[in-house]
Image: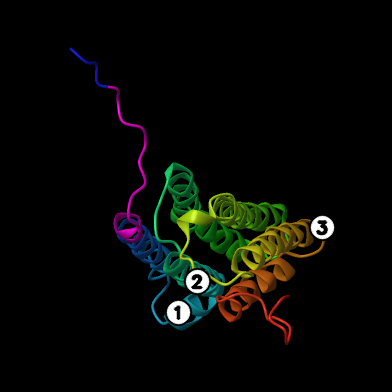
């Protein structure tokens, strides 16, 4: 009687990975809005109380923008991916891990900045946010590196510069968020917050890759 060997991890279509990812992104965005709440206030003081929690609004704006461009870039990536292997699944799960955790440092930053804009707690809070955001960028590095190692998993018509540009953008983001965290700790947390708000704009503008030269080779 012949022995059957266990099947190795086989390639799969992207449908389930995309559906699961979209669900995580939707939950991550929903969790962010839970940080916005009716603030405690005395009668007649609602307006002042609402204005006083401006860090919560700014944190929501920065994090919603970040998750939104992650979803957009994720969609652009999976337009080009035609099959999944274990490495791509692992990289995608790492990306979802960091995305789902984003509401935690967002809430920490909002609470810390409402107490004092420049004390040690605010500096620790922006460092925490910067650390998780940088880790998310590194998860993109892992995803693009897997694409570079396994080009047969990509659509044959994918742009020759797509993966290289993706790696450059991901490393740039990791460095920018790390630098923002250092600015927040060593200078003022408000500088870090400004970077947190602006970086998603960069990722939105470059969601289909960095600008190429006239010959299309850059």
Q: Percent position (x, y) of residue 31?
A: 38, 61
Asked if marks 2 and 1 touch (Cβ < 8 Å), the reply is no
Residue at screen point 40% across, 61% down: 82
Report the residue marked by disc 2: 157
Tag 3 secondary structure: helix
Numbered range of the magenta stretch: 5-18
Q: In this rendered view, identify the residue nearer to me: 156 or 114.
A: 156
Toward the bottom, the furthest residue is 214
Q: Residue furthest top?
A: 1
Picture quadrant where residue 210 is located: bottom right
What residue is pinned by disc 3? Answer: 186
Q: Quadrant of residue 183?
A: bottom right
Q: Earlier in the sequence, mark 2 or mark 1?
A: 1
- Viewer-side label of 3, 2: 2
Rounded to the nearest angstrom, the CA distance separating label 1 from label 3 is: 35 Å
User: Residue 64 at x, y = what percent?
Assistant: 48, 71
170 or 112: nearer the eye? 170
Front disc: 1 or 3: 3
Mark seen at residue 218:
none
Element under disc 1: loop
Expressed as whole percent of the image width and height from the top left, the position of residue 141 reads 61, 54
Mark positioned earlier in the residue sequence (3 or 2): 2
Q: Is residue 94 visible?
A: yes
Which of the numbered marks, if any, corresponds to residue 45? 1
Name the residue: 47% across, 71% down: 76
Few, some or many residues within 10 Å of mark 1 (<14, 14–19, 20+): few
Magenta residues, dominant SS class: loop
In which quadrant will I find the N terminus? Answer: top left
Q: Earlier in the sequence, mark 1 or mark 3?
A: 1
Q: Position of residue 198 (x, y in %)?
A: 65, 76
SS for tag 2? Answer: loop
């Amino acid at each position: 009687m012949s022995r059957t060997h266990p099947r190795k991890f086989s390639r799969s279509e992207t449908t389930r990975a995309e559906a699961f990812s979209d669900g995580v992104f939707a939950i991550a965005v929903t969790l962010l809005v839970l940080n916005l709440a009716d603030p405690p206030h005395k009668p007649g003081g609602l307006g002042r109380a609402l204005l006083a929690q401006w860090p919560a609004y700014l944190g929501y704006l920065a994090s919603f923008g970040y998750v939104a461009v992650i979803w957009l870039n994720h969609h652009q990536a999976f337009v080009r991916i035609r099959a999944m292997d274990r490495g791509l699944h692992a990289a995608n799960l790492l990306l979802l891990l960091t995305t789902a955790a984003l509401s935690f440092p967002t809430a920490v930053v909002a609470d810390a900045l409402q107490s004092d804009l420049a004390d040690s707690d605010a500096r620790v809070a922006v460092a925490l946010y910067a650390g998780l955001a940088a880790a998310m960028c590194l998860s993109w590095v892992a995803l693009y590196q897997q694409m570079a190692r396994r080009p047969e998993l990509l659509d044959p018509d994918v742009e020759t510069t797509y993966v290289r540009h993706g790696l450059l953008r991901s490393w740039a983001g990791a460095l920018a968020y790390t630098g923002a965290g250092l600015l927040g700790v060593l200078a003022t947390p408000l500088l870090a917050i400004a970077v947190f708000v602006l970086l998603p704009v960069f990722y939105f503008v470059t969601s289909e890759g960095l600008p190429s030269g006239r010959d299309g080779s850059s």
